[in-house]
Amino acid sequence: MKVKGKYTIPSLVLFIVGFLVAFAFQHTHALVVDDDRGVQEWEQTFYYRQQLIQFEDNNNQLQQEIDALRLNLIQLEDDLAGQTDTLRSSVSEKLKLQALTGELPIEGPGIFISLRDSEFTPSTERVDEYIVHDRHIQMVINELIVAGAEALAVNGQRIFSDSHVVCIGPVISVDGNQYPAPFVIEAIGDSETLQDSLELSNGIIDILVNEEIEVEIGKKNNIIMQPRMSQ
């Protein structure tokens, strides 16, 4: 059927309008799809960014905890080192005290002093005036203690705070053990101080010499004394 001339222009206009409407609809639909896709991509980007921020916060928190633990560990190591030093010092002090009290052996520099009966042969009535008595030994021991002796021994036997030295005829008994002359008294300590204390003018050695006791004194680089239990 042929379109008459008066309908040609309106028909063309309607066609063009329809085409434009269809094109606009397709374009608008494409824009909507693109907008939806952009929103999804933005949401994903935002989500990942938030996750990254959360991970960084967690890492920072963990690093702070690690730093705190490291500081605690350093403090514990310092405390342990201090306790170890204290314990070592306490053990050393205990061993020293045990050595001084005779529970353990002790050794160190010091001096010796030897006492002998006089070689002069007196009359029978005066014989006791020319031999070493327990009081002579006790005088030397007392002077050495005052001078700072750390340990003492008579003829190798340790002297303790409860020791007793007595005469039994020509011999000396130390805690029940008898020793003949010469009587050698050893003292561990500062050798200079110990010897000077005995050699003071009008001191112990002068007294012994005046009482006809033969005296020998000298220093020793090392003296070893055994504990009470081994004697």
Image: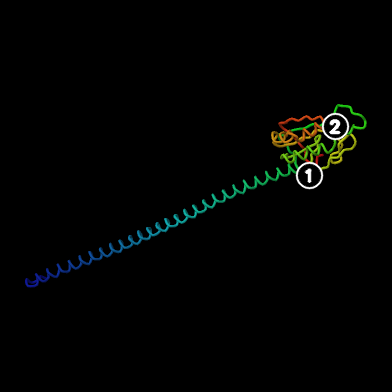
Which residue position holds label 1? 161
Q: Secondary structure at mark 1?
A: loop
Question: Which residue corresponds to the image point at 77% horizontal and 38% vertical from the top-left?
Answer: 152
74 above or below 29?
A: above
Quadrant location of the N terminus in the rendered image: bottom left
Q: Looking at the picture, how far across and down is residue 86, in whole percent?
A: 63, 47
Alpha-carbon neighbours of circle 1 within 10 Å: few (<14), some, or many (≥20)? Answer: few
The numbered mark at residue 200 is: none
Say which amino acid is labelled 1. Answer: Ser
40 above or below 95?
A: below
Location of residue 95 (image quadrant): top right
Q: Looking at the picture, how far across and down is residue 207, in whole percent?
A: 79, 34
Quadrant location of the C terminus in the rendered image: top right
Q: Is residue 197 left or right of residue 21?
A: right
Q: How many marks?
A: 2
Q: Looking at the picture, how far across and down is residue 51, in whole percent?
A: 40, 58
Q: Looking at the picture, how far across and down is residue 83, in whole percent?
A: 62, 49
Q: Secondary structure at mark 2?
A: loop
Q: Is residue 145 left or right of residue 47?
A: right
Type of colouring: rainbow
Alpha-carbon neighbours of circle 2 within 10 Å: few (<14), some, or many (≥20)? Answer: some
Say which amino acid is labelled 2. Answer: Ala
The numbered mark at residue 181 is: 2
